[in-house]
Image (cartoon, grey):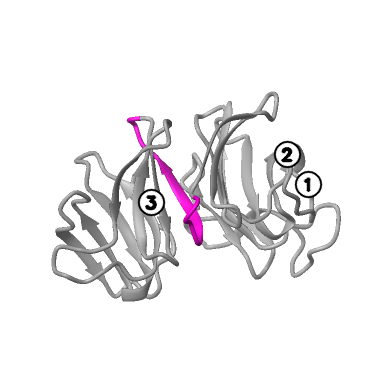
Amino acid sequence: MTVAPNGNPLVATSNGMLIQEIDRTNHQVVWQYGVLNQQYCDKCLHQPKKTHLFNNGTEVLVTDANNRRVVIINKATKQIVWEYGHKAEMRDAIGYLKGNRFAMPMDETGSQILISDTLTNKIMLIDRATKNIAWQWQDASGKWLQNVFPTSDGTFVAEDHLKNEVFEVNKDGKILWTLHQLADGTTLNYPTDAIKLGNSNVLISEGGKRRIIEVNPLTGEIVWKFTGAGLPTAIAVE
């Protein structure tokens, strides 16, 4: 989810196959893309997972997960102006995606697009202009690499919730730390998202324990937690 310049949330509804902007005051839908409960048409989305509004609110990036592609939509015209991957095609070839579950623009203009391909356990930076892979890293032991957070240090924090771990990797492919066991002796239980904070701690949505925790990744110490969040699947910090 992202927030429009007017404060409205922009959300993906996977079951409804829609991207919707919701008026924060009256809760009415004021913009949407996709066709309700339809998967196979020119403007259909198939289980969109992530959406980001960028470029001064003029473009919407969508992780069109089950269509195996990432698209950028002109918000005013509702036309797809950029696409990576091939709709409903899975191949082990450059330019194709097998199981994309996350994507985001790396800057306000979207000059590079960050994509995680879950079924190949890859993190990729795609040049928007050329669609070339500017950088990629693959976790050979990964099981379900999904959400990725780019840090201000040029590194990436990611979660693998089937391995119950969160880690940070740099562009040389070096793992800087891996968080699996916490300082209290327990292990992470189904982490679904992670963000590195300004104090170098990591904010984690821990789905298996239905809580959000702030952890020192070097010691495993929980320094803050929030429980009662249902089943948290994503987090954001403003």
Q: Is residue 168 visible?
A: yes
Mark sitting earlier along the chain (2/1): 1
Magenta-drawn stretch contains 148: yes
Hey, which quadrant is residue 215 in on the image?
bottom left
Identify residue for label 3.
236
**Along the horizontal axis of the image, is 234 left or right of 203?**
right
Mark 2 or 3, closer to the camera: 2
- Identify the magenta region: 140-153
Where 146 falls versus 232 (above or below)? above
Give the side of residue 13 with respect to residue 238, left or right.
Answer: right
**Residue 193 image offset from top left, x and y in percent:** 40, 57
For the point 50% across and 33% down, which residue is it? 106
Mark 1 crowdedness (10 Å alpha carbons): few <14, some 14-19, many ≥20: some
Label placed on residue 95: 2
At numbered mark 2, what does the secondary structure look like: helix, strand or loop? loop
Camera-side residue of 44 and 138: 138
